[in-house]
Image: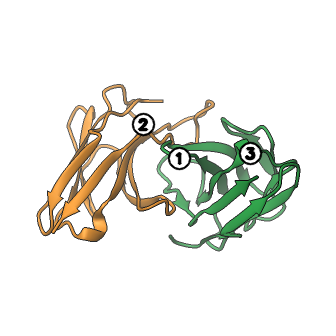
Chain colours: A green, B orange
Amino acid sequence: NAGVTQTPKFQVLKTGQSMTLQCAQDMNHEYMSWYRQDPGMGLRLIHYSVGAGITDQGEVPNGYNVSRSTTEDFPLRLLSAAPSQTSVYFCASSYSIGSGNTIYFGEGSWLTVV
Amino acid sequence: DAKTTQPTSMDCAEGRAANLPCNHSTISGNEYVYWYRQIHSQGPQYIIHGLKNNETNEMASLIITEDRKSSTLILPHATLRDTAVYYCIVRVADGGTSYGKLTFGQGTILTVHP
């Protein structure tokens, strides 16, 4: 996958803890987004950003915060982790939000909340 | 979003062409068809996309019918490493709550046999 880097790759949290999943891209992409994928299900959009300083909610935003202070970085914050947030998280980016622009995904961050 | 329909699973012999169909009968004129694949919970990998014309790249070919209601992804010489879940996605072109988002369905599980 071209240029989208996620850290950490694996994380175990206790219920109520907070943490940040990091996402960085080096392709000067304006559009970035976070998805989660639960077992046997497709990816669902959590939050997205169309540029630095601009963020918006996707279809499952509750329990997550995002910010976009630079073009390169789009961190996802879990405010108070819950077992329902156990999932695989994927960050994605594209040149712009327009539908002809390819979206590229990171390798994923596996999160377990106990 | 335009809904897509794909077969649940398909088999293919190694070295042969794999033809994966997708129906998208409600697609709008400015919506693109994208194909991604996902191997073993890795990040979704972009394969190809198109609007009206057939497309080819180093990975695959995309054949879109003239009425745009269906398409076929062709992997010309399938290998064991092509075993994956393949997603056909129609991407919204303009505005609205689905703008910029990729809606992943269940996809087609392609198994390539030796």
Name the quadrant containing residue B101: top right
Is disc 1 surrounded by few (<14), some (14 to 19) or many (20+) residues within 10 Å?
few
- Res. A74 visible in picture: no
Residue assigned mark 1: A39
Secondary structure state at the residue bearing disc 1: loop
Q: Earlier in the sequence, mark 3 or mark 1?
A: 1
Q: Residue shown at 79%/45% (left/top)?
A: A82
Q: Are marks 2 and 3 on the same chain?
A: no
Residue assigned mark 3: A83
Position in image of residue B88 (x %, y %): 36, 44
Q: Nearer the viewer, mark 2 or mark 1?
A: 1
Instruction: From the viewer's side, name the closer residue of A41 and B95.
Output: A41
Q: Residue shown at 68%/50% (left/top)?
A: A86
The amino acid type of the residue labelled 2 equals Asn
In the picture provided, is B75 more to the left or to the right than A97?
left
Q: Is residue A3 above or below residue A105?
A: below
Position in image of residue A1 (x %, y %): 50, 70
Q: CA distance from mark 3 to mark 1?
A: 14 Å
Instruction: From the viewer's side, name the closer residue of B74 and A54.
Output: B74
Q: Residue shown at 42%/38% (left/top)?
A: B31
Residue assigned mark 2: B30
Q: Numbered disc 2: what chain?
A: B
In the picture provided, is A86 more to the left or to the right than B35?
right
- Res. A90 visible in picture: yes
In the picture provided, is B46 more to the left or to the right than B61?
right
In the picture provided, is B36 more to the left or to the right than A26?
left
Instruction: From the viewer's side, name the closer residue of A80 and B104.
Output: A80
Q: Are marks 2 and 1 in contact (CB under 8 Å)?
A: no
Q: Residue shown at 26%/39% (left/top)?
A: B7
Is disc 2 surrounded by few (<14), some (14 to 19) or many (20+) residues within 10 Å?
some
